[in-house]
């Protein structure tokens, strides 16, 4: 069974397996358009990138890059933008993708990494231990408040429905069920490998990592929060990966429960039409995997 993850996009879903990814989008005409691409993973070419923690950093980078490409494709289909030859342009230029990528990452770093550190630095806290604990609480609070706020936006409701459709399709596939909308609908909209849970654990693990540095000067404070992010993300990836393989462990699921609860903010019950889109993307990527994926590429991906 191929390891599959995914992401909600505009009016659609992207599904990713180790060797390929596919995005399916419901167009304004009601049809389902799909685009698939192979994955040329550095982890497949170099064993060092498959080492624990390092593979998490690589997987996160690849997931972000693929996610931006899939989002660009869905946006163009949703707008039905046509090229000079009359065909729908399915991808933005490399420059536009890099710019969008940089803006999004910069925003996340400033709001959820540097921002909480500087806010805590302004507080009268002398103990290094209490400093990182308070910083962590502020960071998690800001993150949960952000998710709660955007969950109220009507325009994002359909994206959250497609997010749930992605989870339901993967849950049904992993249970060995037929990929039919009526059957998939019965499955949970929560998945332990979800990116939302991953981000929460990045913030929790950060508390333990930053505890080694106490309360440094403000410039080292900013530097450590940015430079140590790959290490923290790699550790969080290993935790999520382990959880995905041991979903029957009740003690582990209890430990990870906050991350599962948080998914309630970013998922909504999907319609059968939305599940049909999710299933189309999943079937496409499974067909591509069945056609042949080198064993070296079989790494975990987030749902």
Image: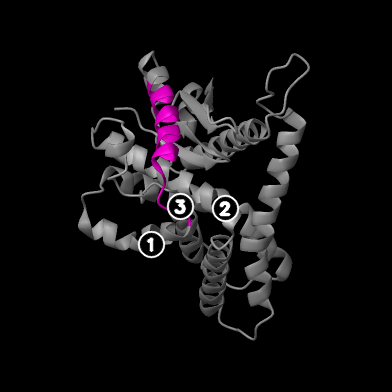
Q: Which residue is mark 1?
A: 261
Mark 3 or 2 closer to N-term? 2
Which residue corresponds to the image point at 23% horizontal and 60% vertical from the top-left? 251
Looking at the image, residue 147 sits to the left or right of residue 165; the answer is: right
Location of residue 276 (image quadrant): top left
> Which mark is drawn over residue 198?
3
Q: Which element carries disc 1, helix, strand or loop?
A: helix
Magenta part of the protein: which range?
Answer: 266-286
Location of residue 297 (image quadrant): top left
Task: Using a 10 Å C-alpha cutoff, classify the residue at mark 1 as few (fewer than 14 neighbours), some (14 to 19) or many (20 or more).
Answer: few
Which residue corresponds to the image point at 72% horizontal and 16% vertical from the top-left? 86
Q: Which element carries disc 3, helix, strand or loop?
A: helix
Q: Position of residue 203 (x, y in %)?
A: 51, 61
Colour logic: one colour
Residue lying farthest front?
A: 29
Label 3 to label 2, Cα distance in Å?
Answer: 20 Å
Task: Using a 10 Å C-alpha cutoff, classify the residue at mark 2 as few (fewer than 14 neighbours), some (14 to 19) or many (20 or more).
Answer: some
> Which mark is drawn over residue 25?
none
Q: Which element carries disc 2, helix, strand or loop?
A: helix
Label 2 to label 1, Cα distance in Å?
Answer: 19 Å
Residue 89 lies in the magenta-colored region: no
Q: Work out whether residue 297 or residue 85 is closer to the camera in this orientation and state it.
A: 85
Mark 2 or 1 closer to N-term? 2
Q: Is residue 270 visible?
A: yes
Q: Is residue 240 above or below residue 183?
A: below
- Image quarter hosting the N terminus: top left
Front position among marks 3 and 2: 2
């Amino acid at each position: 069974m191929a390891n599959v993850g995914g992401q909600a996009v505009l009016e659609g879903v992207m599904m990713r397996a180790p060797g390929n990814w596919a995005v399916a989008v419901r167009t304004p005409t009601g049809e389902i358009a799909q685009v698939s691409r192979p994955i040329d993973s550095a982890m497949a070419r170099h064993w060092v990138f498959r080492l624990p923690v390092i593979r998490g950093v690589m997987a996160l980078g690849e997931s972000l890059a693929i996610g931006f490409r899939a989002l660009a494709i869905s946006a163009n289909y949703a707008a039905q933008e046509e090229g000079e030859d009359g065909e729908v342009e399915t991808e933005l230029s490399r420059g536009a993708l890099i710019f969008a990528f940089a803006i999004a990452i910069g925003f996340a770093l400033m709001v959820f990494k540097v921002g909480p550190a500087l806010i805590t630095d302004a507080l009268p806290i002398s103990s290094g231990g209490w400093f990182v604990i308070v910083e962590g609480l502020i960071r998690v609070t800001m993150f949960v408040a952000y998710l709660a706020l955007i969950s109220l936006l009507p325009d994002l409701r359909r994206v959250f429905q497609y997010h749930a459709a992605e989870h339901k399709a993967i849950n049904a596939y992993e249970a060995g069920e037929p990929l039919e909308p009526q059957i998939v609908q019965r499955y949970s909209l929560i998945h332990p490998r979800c990116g939302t849970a991953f981000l929460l654990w990045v913030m929790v693990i950060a508390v333990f990592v930053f505890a080694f540095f106490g309360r440094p000067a403000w410039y080292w404070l900013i530097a450590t929060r940015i430079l140590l992010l790959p290490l923290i993300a790699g550790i969080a990836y290993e935790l999520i990966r382990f959880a995905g393989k041991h979903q029957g462990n009740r003690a582990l699921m209890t430990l990870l429960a906050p991350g599962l609860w948080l998914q309630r903010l970013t998922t909504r019950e999907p319609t059968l039409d939305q599940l049909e889109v999710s299933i189309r993307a999943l079937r496409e990527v499974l067909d591509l995997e069945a056609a042949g994926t080198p064993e070296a590429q079989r790494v975990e991906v987030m749902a």
